[in-house]
Amino acid sequence: MVGAGSVGSVTAWWLARCGARVVWLAPRTGGGEQPGSLAALGVLMGHCSRRLRGRSWRLRRTALALWRQWLPLLGPVPQQWGLTVLCHQPDEVERLQALVRQRLGEGCPLAWRTREDLLSRWPALAATDLQGGLWSPQDGQLDPAPLLTALAEATGHLGVQRWPAQVTDLKPEGRNWRLQLQASDPDCPATLLASAVVLCTGLGTGRLLAGLDPLILDPSVRLNGPMTPVLGQAAALHCPMLPPQGLPGPVVWRGVHLIPRPQHQQLWIGATVEPGHQSQDHCFEQMLRLDGTAPPWLRQAQVLCRWQGIRARPVGRPAPILATLAPGVLLTSGHYRNGILLAPATAAWTARQLGLLPPDAP
């Protein structure tokens, strides 16, 4: 199991729960490439996704259901349920109301809240062009850092060996795979022989696959190109002018996520979408201003801290990539902005591909 982010963490935990003997190769994140999980705010946009059908919708719906089942097994992870997606475009209202009707027909609770309803309860949402908003009680938010900590502890209890090593090469050896490792810890071996390898490697995927003989790879798998980096910046804010009613929970406002925090008058805001590895101050400021439409209470907010991470976006195919590259080599990567949301569905897919049964299967 290769990968230190949210997808790798959940997958390592679930494979161990299913009875696999797992060695988890997860380098420390003290330097070099910063994983997308560091930019994540943990927003779970499943039922309110505008995807009406297809693989993306199936993954989101499955993932939400699995999070509900799996979170109680991980101990206390800070979580908020109920997500509001604001609408500011008059021509979007009919389409979003149609989405509500479709989701209700599929058994997913989703509701339309009028402008009057929203503003009477939460004056902080005031905007001259506010049309209303979607209310999704089963979408929400998980705090990424405590989630990753809980997963690390849970994998340890299940006997998973976690090595702070980077995979530098991958080659077939009989019916197995030989991984070349690089680690600063002298106790880590230089190689590892595995019957199966799961790559949750983000931007490092291309480097690993480049060393493989193309004749080994399944010809039906077409990656069509590398993954591209997309940087995301986020921040914690103190908002002394925030109306006392606060926010209705996590809010998506013009594509920007606002996450209430337990501390009084504090929020998270994020994340920017910046192609490449370099952060831009003007992108950060544009996010804080909600592209020039921020209400007074947000314009007067104080930035307490800011952080960033790099997300991997597939080129030439939709996110994420879930593929069997060769017998015993699975690629689960390129989740872009939905790593935490889709991690359970990815882990369940991986277990099925490896022929593993859930621990509660008859």
Image: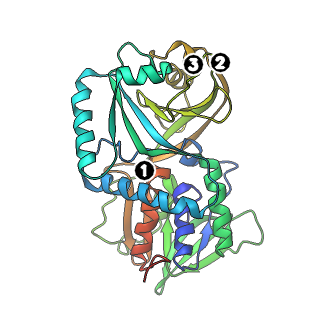
Q: How far apart, in angstroms, are the residues tagged by discs 3 and 2?
A: 9 Å
Residue 200, image x, y percentages = 50, 61
> In the rendered view, how is the structure colored?
rainbow
Task: Give the residue at mark 2.
Answer: 240
Circle 2: residue type: Pro
Residue type at tag 3:
Pro
| Mark 1 / mark 2, whichever is N-terminal | 1
- Tell me where residue 229 appears, x and y as whole percent: 48, 43
Q: CA distance from mark 1 to mark 2?
A: 41 Å
Mark 1 secondary-structure assignment: strand
Of badges 3 and 2, nearer the viewer stands: 3
Residue 171 picture location, percent across and down? 50, 75
Crowd tier of the residue under label 1, counting other residues whose Cα lies within 10 Å: few below 14, some 14–19, many 20 or above: many
Residue at x 56% of width, y 16% of height: 297
Q: Is residue 44 above or below residue 171?
A: above
Query: Which quarter of the picture shows residue 73?
Result: bottom right
Identify which residue is drawn at 35% across, 21% down: 115
Q: Secondary structure at mark 3?
A: loop
